[in-house]
Image (tube, rainbow, N blue to C red):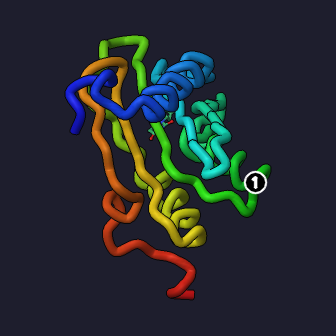
Amino acid sequence: MFETVADLPFSIQKLMNKAHEARDKAYAPYSSFKVGAALQLKSGEIITGNNQENAAYPSGLCAERVAIFYAGSQHPEATIQSMAISAKSMNSKITKPVAPCGSCRQVLAEYEVNQNSLMELYFMGESGKVLKSNSVKDILPLVFDSKFL
Ligand code: THU
């Protein structure tokens, strides 16, 4: 846990800033809850995404999946080193880290397993502490993956 963004390594501060920027462009007219995600590839490239809601509510998608599916579609061979996630509610000030939902954990896990190296995750609210997880597997114990199929 980091007390503030300023305590993060500089490269992660930059990544979190990209997540903030993406978050502010989210399409969240129904929940008023905006989320941004920024992925750092091994090549140095940063890919971002944000939540995209829909009038048919379940058709919307979380920021983390928008970002990682885009990364997967554009850079299928890339290794994702880290992901920063930032959440902001239009109704209240979120000062606690917001962790990815279960469906996003499952999707992120697929990429982590396939790339054979761990993905660091950093998540936060609008301000306040930043929680770090060293890997997706740490926040998804007993993962279901293709080895079961
Ligand atoms: N949301 C995300 O984008 N990421 C998460 O990990 C949690 C939830 C979005 C989905 C929906 O658009 C809004 O936040 C409220 O659930």
Asked which secondary structure carries label 1, the reply is loop
Image location (x, y in percent) of residue 97: 29, 33
> In the picture, which quadrant includes the N terminus?
top left
Q: Which residue is denoted by mark 1 in the rendering?
A: 75
Please rate how many residues cluster around mark 1, counting C-alpha atoms within 10 Å: few if below 14, some from 14 to 19, many from 20. some
**Residue nearest the observer in this picture, 148 or 70:** 70
Image location (x, y in percent) of residue 126: 36, 19
> In the picture, which quadrant includes the C terminus?
bottom right
Residue in view at x 56 percent, y 80 percent? 146
Residue in view at x 47 percent, y 56 percent? 119
Image location (x, y in percent) of residue 44: 63, 42
Is residue 117 at all visible to an observer of this figure?
Answer: yes
Residue in view at x 65 percent, y 29 percent? 55
Vertical relation: 47 (above or below) 75: above
Q: Quadrant of residue 75?
A: bottom right
Is residue 31 at all visible to an observer of this figure?
Answer: no
Q: Is residue 79 left or right of residue 137?
A: right
Give the mark count. Answer: 1
**Residue nearest the observer in this picture, 52 or 23:** 23
Q: Quadrant of residue 29?
A: top right
Vertical relation: 46 (above or below) 147: above
Q: Is residue 1 left or right of residue 6?
A: left
Circle 1: residue type: His
Residue in view at x 43 percent, y 27 percent? 13
